[in-house]
Amino acid sequence: MGSLQDLIKEQGELVRRLKSAKADSALDFKKLFMEIDQDLSNFSYVCGWTASKSDIKLFDLCCTCKNENLNQWPHLNRWFSHMKSFSSRELEKFPESKHLDDITTKINQFGKTSAYDLDRQIQEEVAKLLELKAKLGEDNAPPGKLLLKTPKGTRDYNPEQMALRLSVMDKIVSIFKKHGAETIDTPIFELKDVLTGKYGEDSKLIYDLKDQGGEILALRYDLTVPFARYLAMNKLTNVKRYHIAKVYRRDNPAMTKGRYREFYQCDFDISGQYDPMLPDSECIRIIHEALSSLNLGPFSIKVNHRCLLDGIFAACGVPQDKFRSICSAVDKLDKSPWEEVKKEMVEEKGLDELVADRIYTYVSRNGGKDLVEELKKDVDLAKQTSAVQGLEAMELLLKYCELYKVLDSVVFDLSLARGLDYYTGVIFEAVLTGDDVNVGSVAGGGRYDNLVGMFDTKNKNVPCVGMSLGIERIFSVLESSVARRGKKTRTTEVEVFVAAAQKNLHEERMRIITELWDSGIKAEHSYKKNPKILAQLQHCEEQGIPLAIIIGESEVKKGVVTLRNVLTRDESTIPRDKLIEELRTTLNSLDVSMEH
């Protein structure tokens, strides 16, 4: 016992040291940027008036430090904006630095020892610490007694959390229905052969099940592949469907960021042969509507095209058999610095270092219509048919996004790759951009024209495009928002509580509440024969029930009830024969919120 506690103590100290080292390294970055900002107040480039390779290294460093706002250093920010204007061919022509001053030396040192490499190590050590603590809990459990806990990567939801989740899902479903979608359901497990080979490197996250009567099964990884199987099996083509259900991934969970092993997905897909970008742009419009309706704060929707990415890879010299694996590496740029991604490309994927550097000159850029025009002038991309097709599609997509009034939230981002193998065309991903939000993407999707054909005996393809909302991450943000406001979420929809002010009136309460239920009014009363009136009214206040009907012996004799507004405590006398009519009028005038 003591040795395990010692291990926990040592592991905790290691995590604290790593986090401290990361904080110190962040300060070092700020100090470096401050010095460079002062230097750039007198010169145009790092080494003076002429651009050099040191400028490229500093540019890579600035792109790595996504958490730093360069606006606080005006001269560095001006230089960074200028550097983004150079094409990949122009960057390749930058000469080596002629002299090594202090600034150049520090840039080189940071390039080799990126402090942000600590993130992965911290995550690994924290996971080890949690495993040790779980082991301690098991060891402390009495002999023969079951340790009560939810499995790793899962959670229970209390009534308040479920009330919030259901209200969010209702809003999302109403948006799906507004766009003409119908719904389906599929089994939570599929034949394993249906799932394998569709997710690229993420296939290792599929949950396998034991042999059940001769069938090799696995839990569904997402809702898209089951939908494609459904289309192929039923010989369907033109379908517009939404599907909200649980999926399962054997991932390393991060509960505070809304990443679980069991979680809901909210999917909307359009299958069928239609004109280019019309259904695709509508999917982006739906993401915009959903995120706006949920009041999640500012967000941006990144868009890109798989054909354009393939064209970039070809132009940079990536062998065609490495396109998908390099695409998976690029997909990690939103979570990892370029140094880590480049290391994976070169050391794990076997890509030439110069080819990797050329890729970065493209994938580090983002913009709008102006970036499309800029890339159309790129000589290397113009030689690649897939790149030309991708740029034409992006130009049309951005035009339609403008017509749908969502262009202000859309960013053409060349680093967006979406690692799943089945994407064939436009891809998109939404992220929250608020200062206090760090949950990753909250929506994503794209075009997958060949997936249905994989299940068809004649390899008949059905073009599809769809989007999925990261509902768990959205819940995580909204739960934090509710907690900050100090509001309590209503867990029931009860409109009226029937209370008695005196003893032996439970049968009269039952008569009144039956009348309310028959009229479709949501109501409840105490299950005690003689509850105290104070306890009944306190229950109304705690549960946010807006109205209370109060009866006593005198009210029963007179054929009236007392109607009480729980919030204002105003009371009025209502004849029994006018009760339902008066309740409906009063309820219509009240703003019954889910929070109180």
Image (cartoon, grey):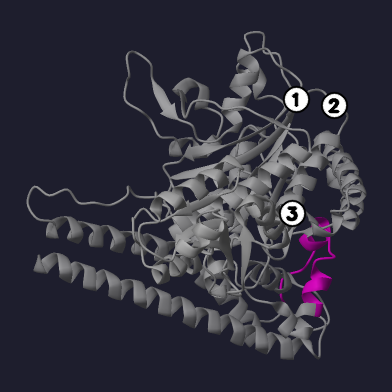
Using residue 447 as the reference point, say whether residue 514 is left or right of it. left
- Where, quadrant-wise, is the C terminus in this rendering? bottom right
Q: Which residues are magenta?
A: 78-97
Q: Which mark is residue 463?
A: 1
What residue did someone put label 2 on? 274
Q: Residues within 10 Å of mark 2 (few under 14, many from 20)?
A: few
Q: Position of residue 1 (x, y in %)?
A: 9, 65
The numbered mark, 1 or 2, whose residue comes first in the sequence reads 2
Taking the spot 45% from the left edge, 52% from the top edge, the residue there is 509
Q: Position of residue 328 (x, y in %)?
A: 59, 44
Taking the spot 42% from the left edge, 75% from the top edge, the residue there is 19
Q: Position of residue 246 (x, y in %)?
A: 50, 39
Q: Is residue 17 above or below residue 175?
A: below
Using residue 534 as the reference point, say whether residue 225 is left or right of it. right
Q: Position of residue 436 (x, y in %)?
A: 60, 72
Q: Which mark is residue 301?
A: 3
Q: Which mark is residue 2?
A: none
